[in-house]
Amino acid sequence: LVTIIRLVFIFQLYFVFLKFLITVRITYEELSIKFSSILIGSKKSYRHFKNMFSEKLKISVVYK
């Protein structure tokens, strides 16, 4: 009877640990998706402003 209780207790601890690992993995994936979308957005805006600025420079050089 004691060994059965120990096995049940070990199984419960193992189950809690697995739930914790799954939660950590999901949280990590959500954070990485958020940060990658932030970084990708900033890269796109940087390229957009860089292109706009370079076009304005080309126009100003042509008019001079």
Image (cartoon, rainbow, N blue to C red):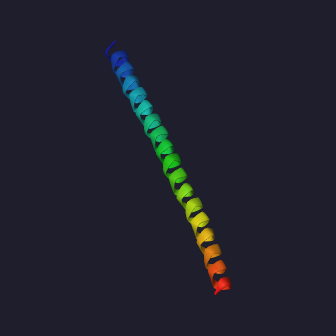
The quadrant of the image that shows the N terminus is top left
Extreme residue in the left direction: 2
Extreme residue in the right direction: 62
Residue 18 at x, y percent in the picture: 44, 32
Residue 51 position by quadrant: bottom right
Residue 39 at x, y percent in the picture: 52, 57
In the image, residue 47 above or below residue 1 = below
In the image, residue 33 above or below residue 40 = above
Q: Which residue is drawn at the image coordinates 59% and 60% (left, top)?
A: 44
Residue 46 at x, y percent in the picture: 55, 65
Looking at the image, which is closer to me, 47 or 16?
47
Extreme residue in the bottom direction: 64
Q: Which residue is drawn at the image coordinates 57% and 60% (left, top)?
A: 45
Q: Is residue 10 left or right of residue 29?
A: left
Extreme residue in the front direction: 63
Q: Which residue is drawn at the image coordinates 34% and 16% (left, top)?
A: 5
Q: Is residue 7 left or right of residue 61?
A: left
Q: What count of labels does the image hold?
A: 0
Q: Which residue is drawn at the image coordinates 47% and 35% (left, top)?
A: 22
Looking at the image, which is closer to me, 31 or 13?
31
In the image, residue 48 above or below residue 18 = below
The quadrant of the image that shows the C terminus is bottom right
